[in-house]
Image (cartoon, rainbow, N blue to C red):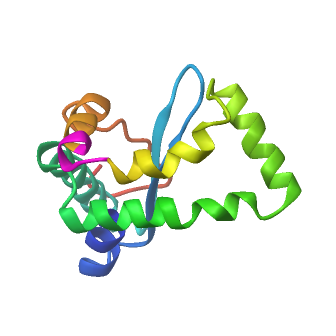
Amino acid sequence: SRLFREVREKRGMAYSVYSHLNEYDHCPMLIGAAATKNERAGEAIGVIQEEFRNFVADGPTEDELDKAKKFLIGSYALRFDTSTKIASQLVNLQLDGFEPSFLDERNGRIAAVTMEDCQRGAKRLLGDGDLLVTVVGKPVGV
């Protein structure tokens, strides 16, 4: 991911860094975390905030979008490799208000996503890219 590359690989600021979407019914949240030394916490937060602002301003690169689509489409079958997983997917479809036909349409919808769709979604969902940050420990520079 972009955060992993910028925070860990390029700068060596954190052992781990990630973000993911929690799709709660009434309050979906984009959650992220980084495990860093106290003395690098402020710097790491700054880089993470800058990456979110850059994503809002510019959207993903063509390569990032292509890799995301391939991952989402390619890994989808793994959600159906046991009867328990199949049942879970069918229940989630129903809870989310989708018809069973969505199973056949999903990958095509993902493949059809454009750069413009991503940029529009980033601006709508992430606003100006400012983050609400909670810190645990005794960080320096925060």
Task: Give the extent of the magenta segment.
Answer: 113-118
Query: Is 85 drawn above or below residue 12 in the view shown?
Result: above
Residue 48: image x %, image y %?
Answer: 28, 55
- Quick check: can you spot residue 60? yes
Q: How many marks?
A: 0
- As drawn, the residue found furthest toward the left would be 57
Q: Residue at x 42, y 66 (%)?
A: 70
Q: Residue at x 52, y 24 (%)?
A: 27
Query: Is 101 drawn above or below residue 142 in the view shown?
Result: above
Q: Residue at x 25, y 77 (%)?
A: 11
Q: Residue at x 26, y 28 (%)?
A: 124
In the figure, is residue 89 to the left or right of 62?
right
* Quadrant position of the N terminus in the picture: bottom left
In the figure, is residue 80 to the left or right of 72?
right
- As drawn, the residue found furthest toward the right would be 83
Image quarter of residue 102: top right
Q: Nearer the viewer, residue 55 or 63?
A: 63
Residue 2: image x %, image y %?
Answer: 30, 65
In the figure, is residue 85 to the left or right of 41?
right
Dominant secondary structure (helix, strand or loop) of the stretch shown in magenta: helix
- As drawn, the residue found furthest toward the top would be 26
Q: Is residue 56 magenta?
A: no
Residue 103: image x %, image y %?
Answer: 62, 44
Query: Is 73 drawn above or below residue 113 in the view shown?
Result: below
In the figure, is residue 47 to the left or right of 82?
left
- Quick check: can you spot residue 35? no
